[in-house]
Amino acid sequence: MERPLLTVLLLVGLVIGCAVGSAYARARRGWNDYQTVKKSVPGARRGAWSLIRGVAVKAAVIGVLLFGAVAYAAVGSDEETAGPTPSQSPTQSEPPHR
């Protein structure tokens, strides 16, 4: 009678031990992954800010160039580039036929 009880207790202990062991291993892996990511965050943050800074500089340059183009178009050039305008030449028309 004692032998089957010990066998059942041993099997229950093995099942519980495997479940607890796998949960502990999963928690340990998660903690190690968390620590790895936590250490890489400052580098990733610096990289993200440098990318944002690059985009902001490019947008500012494009904005300045667009503003300059609009201002130049609004003011116009200082030189008179238009020459004399062509005069209308009289055209010879036929008299109306009746």
Image (cartoon, helix red, strand yellow):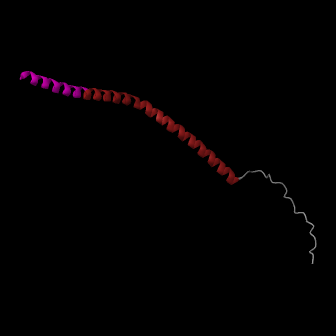
Residue located 40% across and 29% down the image: 40
Q: Residue furthest top?
A: 3
Left or right of 75 in this view: 85: right
Q: Which percent across, then down, holds residue 11?
A: 17, 25
Left or right, 34 with respect to 58, comes to: left
Residue displayed at 15% across by 23% down = 10
Would residue 56 appear left or right of 8 to someone viewing this image?
A: right
Q: Residue at x 31, y 29 (%)?
A: 31
Magenta region includes residue 17: yes
**Which residue is at a point 29% across and 28% down the rendered structure image?**
26
For the record, the magenta segment spans: 1-21
| Residue found at the far left of this picture | 1
Q: Main secondary structure of the magenta part?
A: helix
Q: Is residue 46 above or below residue 61?
A: above
Image location (x, y in percent) of residue 93 = 92, 69
Q: Quadrant of residue 25?
A: top left
Q: Quadrant of the N terminus?
A: top left
In which quadrant is the C terminus drawn? Answer: bottom right
Q: Foreground: 34 or 50? A: 34
Q: Quadrant of residue 88?
A: bottom right
Q: Nearer the viewer, residue 26 or 43?
A: 26
Residue placed furthest toward the bottom: 98
Percent position (x, y) of residue 92?
A: 93, 67
Q: Position of residue 64 (x, y in %)?
A: 61, 45
Q: Is residue 53 above or below residue 10?
A: below
